[in-house]
Amino acid sequence: MYPRVQEGVRYRMEEGEIEVDSILPISFADITPELARESGFKGVIDLLKVAKHGKGENVYLVRFHYVPPRGKLAVPRGPARRRAARPRVAAGRDPRLR
């Protein structure tokens, strides 16, 4: 059985996404208390309660990072804001100049 995620792919969450940086096959012996704590768990047992699925024959260390959702476009300040606030004329003369 292979991992269900792929390296370099982003996966949507409620807010933002996670991007998989690397997938490394490891053994149960590689799961140390330090690795469990680094992964945000109290210890190995807590990690295994959450991470173990199915038969648990294959073990993968999946490293990823959070990608925040894209925010609204910032309103420009200074001269750029004044330029952005000007009405645009699609074609022809500016109707204000009549």
Image (cartoon, rainbow, N blue to C red):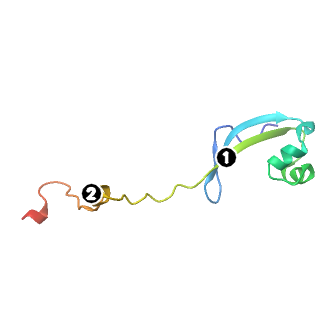
Helix, strand or loop under label 2: helix
Residues tagged 1 and 2 counted as in contact (Cβ below 8 A): no
Q: Residue furthest front?
A: 78
Q: Position of residue 65 (x, y in %)?
A: 67, 46
Residue tagged 1: 65
Residue drawn where x is 88% and y is 47% of the image: 54
Helix, strand or loop under label 1: strand
Q: Of the residues tagged 1 and 2, which is closer to the observer?
A: 2
Do we see residue 58 in this rendering? Answer: yes
Q: Does residue 81 appear left or right of residue 19 in this picture? A: left
Task: Tally the marks.
Answer: 2
Residues packed near mark 1 inside 10 Å, few (<14), some (14 to 19) or many (20 plus): few
Q: Amino acid at mark 1?
A: His
Question: Splitting the image into 4 quarters, where does residue 26 fall?
Answer: top right
Residue nearest the viewer, comparing 89 with 85: 85
Residue nearest the viewer, comparing 1 with 70: 70
Question: Splitting the image into 4 quarters, where does residue 83 fall?
Answer: bottom left
Residue drawn where x is 86% and y is 38% of the image: 58
Q: Is residue 96 above or below residue 60?
A: below
Q: Is residue 69 above or below residue 33?
A: below
Q: Amino acid at mark 2?
A: Arg
Q: Position of residue 85 (x, y in %)?
A: 28, 62
Residue tagged 2: 83
Residues packed near mark 2 inside 10 Å, few (<14), some (14 to 19) or many (20 plus): few
Residue drawn where x is 20% and y is 55% of the image: 90
Which image quarter is the C terminus in?
Answer: bottom left
Do we see residue 4 in this rendering? Answer: no
